[in-house]
Amino acid sequence: MIVRINKIKNFGLFKDFKWSSNIPSFKQFNLIYGWNYSGKTTLSRIFRCVELKAIHSDFQDAEFELIDEQDKKITHRQMGELSYQFRVFNTDFVKENFHWDSQVAEPIFILGKEDIELQKQIDLIKQEIEKLSNENTNKGKEISKVRYRFRE
């Protein structure tokens, strides 16, 4: 569990943040709130970097250092080595996983044998629908050709 953010450099509006002693440590559950453009999404992006084990593309020269409950450091340099499991549901996650134009959402995870079997059945039905749709399109083209021949 992360208990504090020691420092953030060149990451969004955080140019040179250092954790001060008057800021309480994180607990198991934390609520971060503030005005628009106060840094909430930027903080979530730091945690998302740890989740994805890669620095955010907009902040390639950024630096950060998180501290866990065992006083171990997690830095921007060592993310690939970490075994922490983060799940960040921020605006970046929504953009990457929800496709509003097609009304499709990428699955987050499928849990349990029954759900896995149901997903397999759904995938087979989708394949069958696509196959039938293609056949329908081809039959429509054949009908158009036949009608055109009889007009001649």
Image: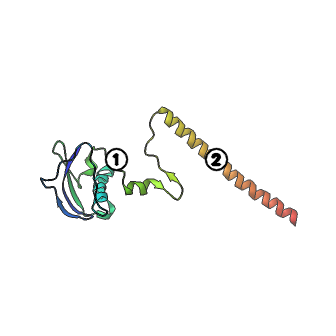
**Residue 3 image offset from top left, x and y in percent:** 20, 46
Q: Quadrant of residue 41?
A: bottom left
**Residue 68 image offset from top left, x and y in percent:** 20, 45
Q: Secondary structure at mark 1?
A: loop
Q: Secondary structure at mark 2?
A: helix
Quadrant of the drawing holding the C terminus: bottom right
Q: Residue at x 51, y 52 (%)?
A: 104
Mark 1 residue type: Arg
Mark 2 residue type: Ile
135 with respect to 7 (left or right): right
Which residue in the protein does label 2 denote?
129
Q: How many marks?
A: 2
Q: Quadrant of residue 54?
A: bottom left
Colour pattern of the rendering: rainbow
Q: Earlier in the sequence, mark 2 or mark 1?
A: 1
Residue furthest left in the image: 21
Which residue in the protein does label 1 denote?
87
Q: Along the line of sight, which residue is nearer the eye, 109 or 135?
A: 109
**Residue 138 image offset from top left, x and y in percent:** 72, 55
Residue furthest top in the image: 113
Mark 2 vs mark 1, CA separation in Å: 34 Å
Q: Residue at x 15, y 45 (%)?
A: 71
The residue carrying pointer 2 sits among few (fewer than 14), some (14 to 19) or many (20 or more) residues within 10 Å by Cα, namely few
Q: Residue at x 79, y 57 (%)?
A: 143
